[in-house]
Image (tube, grey):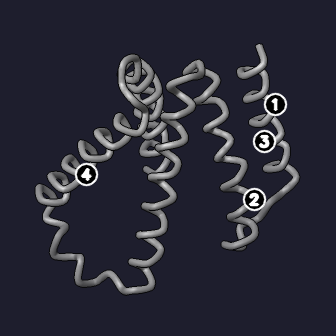
Amino acid sequence: MWILYALLSAVFAAAVAILGKIGLKNVDSTLATTIRAVVMALFLVGAAAVFQKFSLIKTVGSNTLTFIIFSGIAGALSWLFYFFALKYGPASGVAALDRLSVVFVVILAAIFLGEALTAKSALGLLFIVGGALLLVFK
C-alpha cells in the first residue's frame, strides 16, 4: 500500500510544480508559500476532523512532538526555497533539483536511521543525480 501512497504523492507533487509556477506569475513567492501553507493547514485540519484523529493528540509524546515540530520547520523552509526557485526558474529544472532530496534522504537515513546503503542503492542515487543534471543542463 505504501507504494500507491508514494506514487500519489509524486503525482500531487507534480501538480504543485505546475500550479505553483502558474500561480507565482504575479505574486511574491513568500506570500504564495504562506497562502499555500494556510490552505494546506485548513485542509489537513478538516481531514483530521473527518477521520476523527484529534483524540489521538494526547498519545503524542514530547520527544515525538519535538521531531514533528522540527519536521514542520524543515518543510516550511523547503517550501520557501522551492517557491523562490520556481518563481525564477523553469518548473522542470526546479522539480528535478528538488527531487535530489531523495539522495539526501538515502544518505541521512543510512547515517541516522541505520538503513542500508548498498551498491545497488548507490547506483540508483547516481542515476538520480545524473537525471537531475540532464534535466537542468539541457
The crowding category of the residue bearing disc 4, from other C-alpha atoms within 10 Å (few below 14, some 14 to 19, many at least 20), is few
Q: Position of residue 124 (x, y in %)?
A: 78, 42
x, y percent for residue 72: 43, 61
Measured Cα–Cα span from mark 4 to mark 3: 34 Å
Q: Is residue 50 left or right of residue 123?
A: left
- Closer to the chain start, of discs 2 and 1, is 2
Q: Amino acid at mark 2?
A: Ile
First in residue order: circle 1 vs circle 3: 3
Point out the image quarter for the C terminus.
Answer: top right
Residue 44 lies left or right of residue 134; in this view the side is: left
The mark lying in front, picked from 4 and 3, is 4
C-alpha distance separating marks 1 and 3: 10 Å
Tag of residue 124: 3
Residue identifier under label 4? 41
In front of the other: 4 or 48: 48
Contact check, label 4 and label 3, Cβ < 8 Å: no
| Badge count | 4
Dot in front, 1 or 3: 1
Mark 3 neighbour density, 10 Å: few (under 14) some (14–19) many (20 or more)? few
- Callout 2: SS: helix
Secondary structure beneath label 3: helix
Up the image or down, 68 lies above or below 51; here it is below
The residue lying at 15 percent from left, 52 percent from top is 46
Tell me the number on the disc at residue 107: 2
Closer to the N terminus: mark 4 or mark 3? 4
Tell me if residue 75 comes above or below residue 114 in the rendering: above
Q: Measuring 71% from the left and 56% from the top, which residue is drawn there?
A: 106
Q: Where residue 12 sits: x, y (%)?
A: 40, 33
Q: Which residue matches tag 1?
A: 130
Q: Position of residue 87 (x, y in %)?
A: 50, 25
